[in-house]
Amino acid sequence: MTGGTEQAGAINRILSEAAQQTGVAMGVGSQRAALDHPELQDTYKVRQYAPDILLLANLGAVQLNYGYGVAECLRAVEMIEADALILHFNALQEAVQEGGDTRFFWPCEKARPDLPCSAGTGDCKGGRLGFL
């Protein structure tokens, strides 16, 4: 679960081949770098090495608070021919990382516009679910 560098691309290839051989699912690392820098996309593309596995695209949920939306989510899925999308929550890493994205309020309507905010996510006030 990595991506964005030449070494990360090699690791993803190895992981995807192992996933194909064992029949397990695989998720790539956060694809934000590849969406912002298209020249990095190949480091995430593993479908050719694992044509039969459940392959998961991946973005940080906090990116929805920084201008990402459905279009970027679809681009991540299409980029790697994924079967589904993971929206990961890594608030601690972002909080301690230099330049981390720390706007942790979850815009519920972006994640599931078809559901009321409280459906399955706990009690939201003002249409937002707060983290931290």
Image: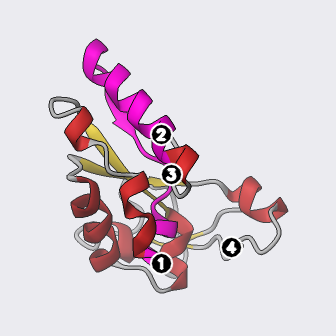
In the rendered structure, the answer to whether residue 5 lies left or right of residue 59 reads: right
Q: How many marks?
A: 4
Q: Mark 2 vs mark 4: which is more N-terminal?
A: 2
Residue type beneath disc 4? Asp
**Distance in Å between CA atoms under marks 2 and 4:** 27 Å
- The label shown at residue 101 is 4
- The label shown at residue 36 is 1
Residue 128 seen by the camera? no
Q: Mark 4 vs mark 1: which is more N-terminal?
A: 1
Of labels 3 and 4, the one closer to you: 3
Q: Which residue is mark 2?
A: 10
Q: Mark 3 vs mark 2: which is more N-terminal?
A: 3
Of labels 1 and 2, the one closer to you: 2
SS under mark 1: helix
Residue 58 included in the magenta stretch of the image: no
Asked if 109 appears above or below 5 in the picture, the reply is: below
Q: Nearer the viewer, residue 14 or 29?
A: 14
Of labels 3 and 2, the one closer to you: 2
- The label shown at residue 3 is 3
Of labels 2 and 4, the one closer to you: 2
Q: Residue furthest bottom?
A: 67
Span of residues in magenta:
9-37
Residue type beneath disc 2? Ala
Q: Residue furthest top?
A: 22
Image-quadrant location for residue 59: bottom left
**Distance in Å between CA atoms under marks 4 and 1:** 15 Å
SS under mark 4: loop
